[in-house]
Image: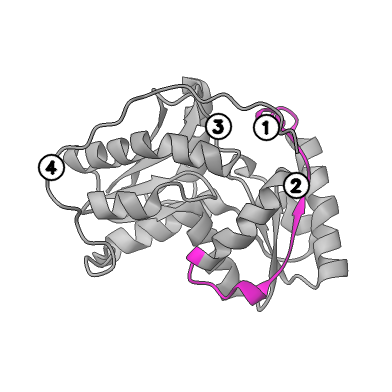
């Protein structure tokens, strides 16, 4: 079984990619081969809806290539599930994003759950995102942020775990959460430590999406063509450009 993981961030080193693969292989069957590719032509890190829009064309291109290379499934390695609908339309193999997998898993383990994300700026987007996952949005107790830069999450993992546990306790004690979701796939490998500190299930979205995809493939399941019909035939082109963001004036 071969699974392609599309990481919609730019510039990750070979060592960083291999670190993630090694952790994820611990929760897959011995016959599962994981391969991760980052974006090469889109110099973005998924930290906003704008980043998702700019990265989407290359993500779809990589999804099509994965099917052509005879992969059995495609994972979008981001809690925002960037371009997931477009990838399902374009590819005839199962496509699953980290966000949907995490929310579906949380909904299976408790009545109410909270999300811990990286930045307070992402909270409005995440409130809307849950509506696309198939999970009742009223089950989301709260979204809290540990306010950490994406590039620093894994530099001091103990510090990051401390932040997650602190905000996680607030989700439980103040918001009524029964399950927690780590709101970024860069938190890979931290869920167990956070869970031990707060005494409740904590969802690692990277592990959730890999194991869910493995289950789909073993069952021979793929997304419905009624839901995600193949687009009309023909070539599409896009012009790669540069988008600069300045501070808003109002």
Residue 213: percent from the left, percent from the top? 38, 57
Q: Residue 85 is drawn in which quadrant?
A: bottom left
| Element class at badge 3 | loop
Is there any visible trace of residue 71 in the rendered image? yes
Left or right: where does residue 101 sit relative to residue 141? left
**Which callout, 1 or 4, points at the residue further toward the start of the chain?**
1
The residue where tag 1 is placed is 154
Q: Nearer the viewer, residue 229 or 197?
A: 229
Q: CA distance from mark 1 to mark 4?
A: 42 Å
Residue 247: percent from the left, percent from the top? 71, 29
Residue 43: percent from the left, percent from the top? 48, 24
The residue where tag 4 is placed is 234
Image depth: mark 3 or mark 1 in front: 3
How many C-alpha atoms fall within 10 Å of the one at disc 1: few (<14), some, or many (≥20)?
some
In the rendered structure, does residue 149 fall within the stretch colored magenta? Answer: yes
Left or right: where does residue 41 sit relative to residue 193? left
How many C-alpha atoms fall within 10 Å of the one at disc 2: few (<14), some, or many (≥20)?
some
Q: Examine the rendered structure and indicate whether residue 55 appears above or below residue 242.
A: below
Image depth: mark 3 or mark 4 in front: 4
The residue where tag 3 is placed is 45
| Element class at badge 2 | helix
**Which callout, 3 or 1, points at the residue further toward the start of the chain?**
3
The residue where tag 2 is placed is 120
**Which callout, 2 or 1, points at the residue further toward the start of the chain?**
2
Q: CA distance from mark 2 to mark 3?
A: 16 Å
In the rendered structure, does residue 247 fall within the stretch colored magenta? Answer: no
Q: At x 54% / y 50%, what residue is drawn? A: 79
Q: At x 78% / y 45%, what residue is drawn? A: 146
């Amino acid at each position: 079984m071969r699974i392609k993981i599309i990481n919609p961030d730019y510039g990750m080193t070979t060592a960083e990619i291999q670190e993630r693969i090694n952790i994820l292989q611990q929760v897959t069957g011995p016959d599962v081969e994981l391969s991760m590719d980052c974006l090469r032509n889109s110099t973005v890190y998924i930290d906003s809806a704008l980043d998702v829009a700019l990265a989407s064309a290359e993500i779809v291109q990589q999804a099509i290539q994965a099917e052509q290379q005879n992969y059995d499934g495609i994972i979008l390695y981001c809690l925002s599930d960037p371009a997931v609908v477009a990838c399902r339309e374009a590819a005839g193999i199962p496509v699953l994003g980290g966000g949907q997998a995490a929310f579906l898993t949380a909904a299976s383990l408790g009545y109410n759950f909270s999300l811990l994300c990286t930045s307070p700026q992402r909270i409005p987007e995440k409130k809307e995102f849950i509506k696309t996952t198939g999970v009742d949005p009223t089950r989301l107790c709260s979204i809290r942020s540990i306010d950490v830069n994406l590039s620093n999450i894994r530099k001091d993992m103990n510090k990051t775990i401390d932040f997650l546990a602190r905000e996680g306790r607030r989700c439980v004690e103040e918001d009524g959460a029964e399950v927690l979701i780590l709101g970024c796939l860069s938190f890979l490998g931290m869920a167990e430590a956070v869970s031990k500190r707060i005494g409740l299930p904590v969802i690692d979205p990277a592990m959730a999406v890999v194991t869910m995809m493995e289950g789909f493939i073993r069952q021979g399941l793929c997304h419905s063509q009624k839901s995600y019909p193949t687009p009309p035939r023909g070539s599409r082109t896009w012009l790669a450009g540069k988008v600069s963001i300045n501070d808003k004036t109002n």
